[in-house]
Image (cartoon, helix red, strand yellow):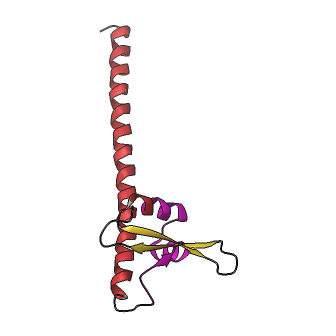
Amino acid sequence: MNTKETIEIAGNASAILTALVATLAGVGYKYAAWKKTKCLEDYLRSEKQKNITSREDKGQRSILHLMARVGLTESEILQASFKSRYIKRLLTTSAATHLANDILLEYDPLGKSN
């Protein structure tokens, strides 16, 4: 086997290996995003179930509360809420200024939030 053939084989092997690594990285990224979404859904579902008899607490939680309890960043929580059809986003406004105060997230058992 001469040098040219060796280089061709190495080039083909590296192209296959690159595709394989990229595919594994993509699958890992998708799995991590799914896991975060599932974690957020599970927490919001449990909060809604705890307070099912209370008319005052509908299981709505602020992003700051969720950051502390679930252990995700603000960005991860928002991304998970947009990916999930079971998480409803609600906007609260100030009575005095009529400007947005906070985003509350709530579990929607019907899955019709998007």
Q: Nearer the viewer, residue 95 or 41?
A: 95
- Is 40 above or below relative to 76? below
- Res 45 quadrant in image: bottom left
- Is 83 above or below relative to 60? above
Q: Position of residue 43 (x, y in %)?
A: 38, 75
Left-right relation of 71 to 6: right
Point out the image quarter for the N terminus: top left
Q: Position of residue 64 (x, y in %)?
A: 55, 74
Left-right relation of 13 to 81: left
Q: Residue at x 39, y 92 (%)?
A: 54
Q: Which residues are magenta?
A: 56-80
Is residue 47 located in the magenta-colored stretch of the structure?
A: no
Question: Principal SS element in the magenta part?
Answer: helix
Q: Nearer the viewer, residue 78 or 103?
A: 103
Point out the image quarter for the C terminus: bottom left
Left-right relation of 70 to 24: right
- Res 31 quadrant in image: bottom left
